Image (tube, coloured by chain):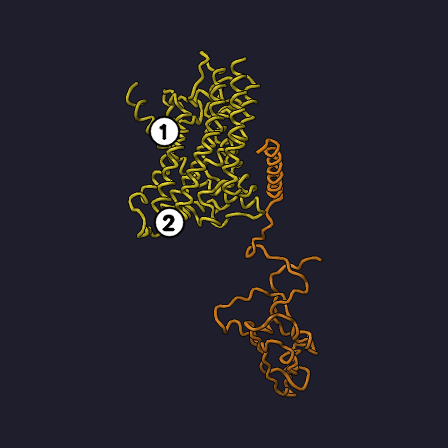
Chain colours: A orange, B yellow
Amino acid sequence: MAVSDGIKGAVEIAKSMAVTLRALLAGPLTVQYPEQPIAIYPRFRARHELRRYGNGLERCIGCMLCEAACPTGAIHVEAAENDPEHPVSPGERYAKVWEVNLMRCIFCGDCETACPVEAVVLGHEYELAGYSRDDLLWTKERLLEPTRPNVIIRTE
Amino acid sequence: MDWISLILIPAIKSLILVIVLLTGFAYATWFERKLIGRFQQRIGPNRAWTFGLGHPIADALKMIFKEEIVPSYVDKILFVMAPGLAIVPALLIFAVVPVGPNITLFGREIPLVVADVNIGLLWVLAVAGVGVYGIILGGWASNNKYSLLGALRTSAQMLSYELPMGVLLIAILLTTALGTADGAGTLSLVQIVNMELPWYIRIWILLAFPLYFITMLAETSRKPFDFPETENELVAGFQTEYGSIKFALFYMTEYLHILGASGVAVSVFFGGWRGPFVEQAPILGVFYFAAKLIAMVFLFIWVSASVPRPRYDQLLRFCWTFLFPVSLVYLAITAAIVILL
């Protein structure tokens, strides 16, 4: 091995050590996730939410288009006729049962697109772990509860 | 010499040294994990207590309470003996390294070194040589191809790199002839640190440091020269079959070697405990020594974060065809300088 090889090698090692030193000085990129929230994009698709009108009526009219649009069959809707005295929704019918199985859902957002009255939207709550299968079968009552998930929206 | 200064004080000093070294080992692992993390732009351990300072303690507890497995096909006596054989020399190296100047305590003058023996550097080389036995016996007793390969690599690597290391140390010992009154030089690390050398000799000694550092990396089998345990080729080399506290002892040995080698290098190349205002407040020397030691450990970790592992034949070719001749040239030039001055 020639001495010039040794010098060349020393230069290369010095370069690689400079790279790591720059990384050291730049500081960590890690986000301490459960303590520090991760910024998400505004159009991030997480768990479904069912919406109401301002007067308290449910938007969902039980048309079952979301169920038809769902590629994995995660949504199950059973419609019923509205009682004219005490309507649940402004239309003729309402959703008696509106369930989404989050173990099947792929969060594609097709239900959101299919919905003619913007009743179902994919919100920002993405911390969806559950202790049982029932925990992941979200029913209408749970989906109707207004949520304000603790997320930071990323500026674009 | 009364019995207090003969037995009691050295005993207390060795006890303190062992405790400090073992704690130092635990926090050297913490320092390494933390620093490697930062080098890779991660945060590193931070779960147990502030800055993850509890991780070494948790690791120790885990290691102690793990099931102790001795495989049925191993040589049981050697298998159990090997970790002990590895760790004792690693602890012994530090005995001759002065961590500070003499301090006065309870009316007694106490040198801050466990044993100021006049063969200091020879002691370091000899003890480091014995340290290889633990690793070789561990690999042999495991009765496993990977372990044996790791152990064989270790022996070849350490024997090869002891040569340039020894030659470089001889060159530095030659310069001590300029620092001692009778011109005979010295092997004692205490005297090497105390010595007054001309500034150009100091710079000349520092020139040898990069070469010496490479031999240190190989002798302590640290990355990028961690051939005894090359994970991707040999599983974990000589420590494949070891678990629980026996594995911890090998692990400890590795870090104690780093601390020991750093201590020797700091004493030989960077003036040990010396620094400004040490004459007025001798206890400052301990802090200077600790700071220099930590800087040296930082260098170890920095290199291990930056440089990939070479191939095994490259390692040996580098030693025999580059490092060894270059250190011989360095030795010759040093000898000429010492004679001419």
Instruction: Report the residue marked by disc 1.
Output: B13
For disc 2, the neighbor class at 10 Å (few under 14, some 14 to 19, many from 20) is some
Q: Is residue B336 above or below residue B84?
A: above
**Residue B217, position as x, y percentages in the image:** 49, 36
**Residue B179, position as x, y percentages in the image:** 49, 16
Q: Nearer the viewer, residue B153 or A151?
A: B153
**Residue A134, position as x, y percentages in the image:** 50, 74
Q: Helix, strand, or loop for circle 1?
A: helix
Disc 2 vs disc 1: Cβ atoms closer than 8 Å?
no
* Quadrant housing the C terminus of chain A: bottom right
Please name the residue shown 59% across and 76% down the image: A72
> Which callout, 2 or 1, points at the residue further toward the start of the chain?
1
Based on the displayed image, in which of its 4 quarters is residue A149 positioned?
bottom right
Instruction: Report the residue marked by disc 2.
Output: B144
- Tell me, yes or no, if residue B27 can be seen here: yes
Q: Nearer the viewer, residue B261 or A156?
A: B261
What kind of residue is marked 2?
A: Asn
Please name the residue shown 44% across and 27% down the image: B99
* Quadrant housing the N terminus of chain A: top right
Subunit that carries the residue with mark 2 = B
**Residue A155, position as x, y percentages in the image:** 70, 57
Q: Helix, strand, or loop for circle 2?
A: loop
Distance from disc 2 to disc 1, alpha carbons, whole Å, reads 41 Å
What kind of residue is marked 1?
A: Lys
Same chain for the residues under marks 2 and 1 in the image: yes
